[in-house]
Structure formats: C-alpha cells, structure tokens
C-alpha cells in the first residue's frame, strides 16, 4: 500500500443558505419512536444541525410496516397523520436533533475533501427490541449546507428503486440499509425534465462510511478522528474498546464485513455501480442504491451505470475496489494505529494484503452453497469447479440467476440433465455443459444427501426472483408517469420471497428480451 497520504488542511465550509425554520413537534412516544442522538451529541464538528424542508402536499407511496414493527415503532400510529407529517418534513418528533453529516470521499478514484449529506438528514437513532441501534434518516428532504449547488430533492423513481432494492437484498439475506417509508412530496423536481418529487426514509446500522474517516484524516484533526474511531468501535465493535490494537482491530473488522458482503453480491450477480469510498459503510451494509442493477446474462465486465464509462465498478472489479477502498480507510487510520508511521504502514498493509485471501474464502463459501457442495471438499478442486461453471455461463451467455436455480432441476432429473438448464445454453455449448454437470454430480456424492435433499438445499441457496431490470423500470415508470403503484407493489411482493415458487408470478423470473437488455443503463438519480 502506498505510504502517500493527502494532507489537506482545509476547514469545513458550508453554503450560506439559512437553516430552515423551526418545525412543530409531534409526540414521539405516540409513534413509538424514542429517539437518541449519539452521533449528533458525540461527534460535534462532523455534522451541521439542520431541518428538513417541508413537503408541500405529502402522501404515502409505501410504508414498511414489517420494518417499523421490527424497530419497535407503532406502525399504526406512523401510518396516520402524525407519521406522515414527520416523514415528510412537516414536523419533527420530540427528541429529534436532525443533522446533515459531513464526509469526504474518493469518487471514481478522485479525492474530494468535503462531500456530505447534500440531500439527506439524520433524524436520530432508535434502539430496537434486540438492543441494536439504528439510524433513521431522510433522503431527498431538501438542501443542506453540503448541497454544493444541488436542490437536495429526490424523484419518485430513484426513491422507489432504493426501496425495492433494499427489500430485495434483505430477502436475499444480504446486509443492507432499508427503506422505512417512501413519501410523495406533491412537488416537481427539475431533472432532464420535471419529475414528481419524493422522500425516502432510510434505516441503517449507521451511516459511518470510509469517507467519514477520510474527512478528519485529510484535515489532520487527530482529536476528532480519534473520537470518530472510538464512536465507531463502541457502536459496531464494542468488544474492541480499550484493546491496545483497537484501531487496527477496527480495520480488520471492516475488512471482514466487506469481504463477506462483496462475496454475497457476487453470488447473486449484484452490481453496485458506484463503489466510491463515501458509499462503503463501516457496518458492512449495502448503501446508496443509485445506478445499481442485477446482472442477467453472466459477463464479468458487466456495467450498467451511465457514469461508469471505464468500467471501474464492473461486476468482476467489485472485490478489487473493495480492497482499494479499504486501503483508503487504512490511510485514514494510520496515525491512530501506531505513533511510528513506518510501523503503522506495516501493520495496516498486513490487513490490506490479507484481504484477497479473506474475500476468496467468503467467495468460496458463497458459491459452494450455491452448488450444494460440502465445505470439507478440496478448496482448489471446488474453486476450479465453480470457475468452470461461471466460464460456461459467460461463453454461453446464460442467465446467472436461472442457471444456478436450475441446478436443483438437474439434481432431480433421472438422466442428470434438466431441460430448463439445457435451454439456457446454445446448442454448441450443451456438450461442455453436460460434461460439467457430470463432474459436479460426482462431487455431490460426497455430500451424503439424497437428490431430493440436495434439491431443497439448492433452491434455498439460489433465488428464483431477483429485481429484473425491465421489471424494475416498468414499476418505476408506472409510478412516475401515471402515479400507478400497482406494478411496484406487485414486484415488491414477489421480491420479498425470492426463493419460493409463487404461482402466477412466472413472468417475474424471466430475463429481459434481447431488445430490452441492449444498451440498458442506470442513473444516479441526483
């Protein structure tokens, strides 16, 4: 890892916009929303107190009742007028101290010493019935001191995309931020054309990012950097608190969480699209579903994001970028890891250099499960078996999701084949596929499981439904153009049970047509 580090002595500068006027208060107890403000109280200098801009004519787009209940909130009360007023910025719950968070970040490899919440606000934190602290934050609630010329708003389409993607990832068992609510604001936001506005209410284990650490490290503000690191440890890794190597330990834990997360992304063909350091969380949750999408035909170089012109964040590059981002976190933590810079560099370099093996172990575990392999197999042989299957998917242009799903059908087939699987490959590629299936089934013998047992395990590991890009666009277009939420709600219902066969939902499992896939792009929505 390079020993060079940006030493920026810039101070935090904010726009001159006046703070929005004070807002009426709603009794938080009636909503079951007992708010704490540990971030606002303990990390002064890393945020700006701010109020949301009230939505002029708010209405519900979606309310995540299941998540509200999991957080210990009163879902029925939140669904009422007071909940709508709070989530649309017309009122604040008692106990709330909303702030716009400051952070820096590398965006497509270029460092920006100050970014921050340009259209987001941390309303506060709740402690759920399991004792876990969760942030409740707005996205699209208006300008903040960090807006840098933006309007601070969000449109219906990007808000509902994030809602859908978060719930899909949750159902797939992948760590993620989630949407508690989506609110239509009743106003138009100016993009390439006027679009209906919306606010997302997002829940996260925290909004601490690699870029949060970069913010103070770039300013050489040791006191605030240490306070931030101590806060992160107490919140996410309390067992490290007070240990001699607690800051190095924090780096190791973040590396472990990111290795697990990225391996899970790769398993389902998820492409984040904008893995900047301000979009990598310390908690290991997926955050900021902007130009993300799920790969259909398996291709390592797949890119959907319209702004990723060089493929920096392509599917196959995601583990490499995760390591690169972790190296930036390591740079930010150097002064805390050891007072001697050379020793600090050596210590963090060990963590960064160990990441590929850490990730590889997680990747192998993910794909072993997807192939129904027992973990006691030979690592090299299993890796070759997995890589050969992925290579077949690539050369044949086979659908990533359905190819893995149909492995269960192949197990149950008396001839070791499955018509569904064979149909995914072009005729010239079926012989290599059959040869691979024979190798795979020989490997399965060591599992000691019967074909029906293997089929159950395979279907539990490989989803039938993912957020197919054309289905997502169909739902967002209907909501944006016609105010029709039925396609969104139907897709959301399907995505909440991705592993279960849902009669009547067969079309949601099918890939887009060649015409629909051609040139498909996603956008940040800012």
Image (tube, rainbow, N blue to C red):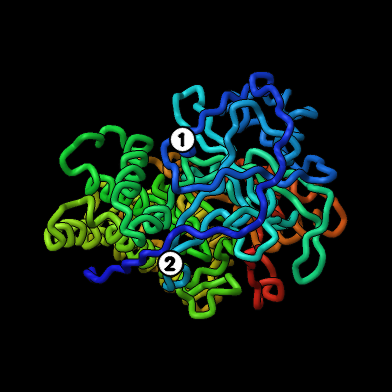
In the rendered structure, the answer to whether residue 84 lies left or right of residue 290 reads: right
**Residue 65 vs residue 246, the one in the foreground:** 246
In the rendered structure, the answer to whether residue 51 lies left or right of residue 110 reads: right
**Residue 508 vs residue 5, the one in the foreground:** 5
Residue placed under numbered mark 1 in the picture: 41
Discs 2/1, front? 1
- Tell which residue pokes out farthest to the right in this image: 482
**Residue 172 vs residue 134, the one in the foreground:** 134
Work out whether 369 lies above or below 418.
Answer: above
Task: Classify residue 179 by image quadrant.
Answer: top right
Residue placed under numbered mark 2 in the picture: 106
Work out whether 316 lies above or below 378.
Answer: below
**Residue 374 vs residue 27, the one in the foreground:** 27
Which residue is depicted at the point 44% across and 63% down?
Answer: 105
- Tell which residue pokes out farthest to the top in this image: 29
- For label 1, the crowd category at 10 Å Cα-Cα, with few meaning under 14, some 14 to 19 and many 20 or more, is few
Callout 2 secondary element: strand
Return the x and y of residue 345 as percentages of the image width and height.
18, 62
Work out whether 296 lies above or below 458.
Answer: below
């Amino acid at each position: 890892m390079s020993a060079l580090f940006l030493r920026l002595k810039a101070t935090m500068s904010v726009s001159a916009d006046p703070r929005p006027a004070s807002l009426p208060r709603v009794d938080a107890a009636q909503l079951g929303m007992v708010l704490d403000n540990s971030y606002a109280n303990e990390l002064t200098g890393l945020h700006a107190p701010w109020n949301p801009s009230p939505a002029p004519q708010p209405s519900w787009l979606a309310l995540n009742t299941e998540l509200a209940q999991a957080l210990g909130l009163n879902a029925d009360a939140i669904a009422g007028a007071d909940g709508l007023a709070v989530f649309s910025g017309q009122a604040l719950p008692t106990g709330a101290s909303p702030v716009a968070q400051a952070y820096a970040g590398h965006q497509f490899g270029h460092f920006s010493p100050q970014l921050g919440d340009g259209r987001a606000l941390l309303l506060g934190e709740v402690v759920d019935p399991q004792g876990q602290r969760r942030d409740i934050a707005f996205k699209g609630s208006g300008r903040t001191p960090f807006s840098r010329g933006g309007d601070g708003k969000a449109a219906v389409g990007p808000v509902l995309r994030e809602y859908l993607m978060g719930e899909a990832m949750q159902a797939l068992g992948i760590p993620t931020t989630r949407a508690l609510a989506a609110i239509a604001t009743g106003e138009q936001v100016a993009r390439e054309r006027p679009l209906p506005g919306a606010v997302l209410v997002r829940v996260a284990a925290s909004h601490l990012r690699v870029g949060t650490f970069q913010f103070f490290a770039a300013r050489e503000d040791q006191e605030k950097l240490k306070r931030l690191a101590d806060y992160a440890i107490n919140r996410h890794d309390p067992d490290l608190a007070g240990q001699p190597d607690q800051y190095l330990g924090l780096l190791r834990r973040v590396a472990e969480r990111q290795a697990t997360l990225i391996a899970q992304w790769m398993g389902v063909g998820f492409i984040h699209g904008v893995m900047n350091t301000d979009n990598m969380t310390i908690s290991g949750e997926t955050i900021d579903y902007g130009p993300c999408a799920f790969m259909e035909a398996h291709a390592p170089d797949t890119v959907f994001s319209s702004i990723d012109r060089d493929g920096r964040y392509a599917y196959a590059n995601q583990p490499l970028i995760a390591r690169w981002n972790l190296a930036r976190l390591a740079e930010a933590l150097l002064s805390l890891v050891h007072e001697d810079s050379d020793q600090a560099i050596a210590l963090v370099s060990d963590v960064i250099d160990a990441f590929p093996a850490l990730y590889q172990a997680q990747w192998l575990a993910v794909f072993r499960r997807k192939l129904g392999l027992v973990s006691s197999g030979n690592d090299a042989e299993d890796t070759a078996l997995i890589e050969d299957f992925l290579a077949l998917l690539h050369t044949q242009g086979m659908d990533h999701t359905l190819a893995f799903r149909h492995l269960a059908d192949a197990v149950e087939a008396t001839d070791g084949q499955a018509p569904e699987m064979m149909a995914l490959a072009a005729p010239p590629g079926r012989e290599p596929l059959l040869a691979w299936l024979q190798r795979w089934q020989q490997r399965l013998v060591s599992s000691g499981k019967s074909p029906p047992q293997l089929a159950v395990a395979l279907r539990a590991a490989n989803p039938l439904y993912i957020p197919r890009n054309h289905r997502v666009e169909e739902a967002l277009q209907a909501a944006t153009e016609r105010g029709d939420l039925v396609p969104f709600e139907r897709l959301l219902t399907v995505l909440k049970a991705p592993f279960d066969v849902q009669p009547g939902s067969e079309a949601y499992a099918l890939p887009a047509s060649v015409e629909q896939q051609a040139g498909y792009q996603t956008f940040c929505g800012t």
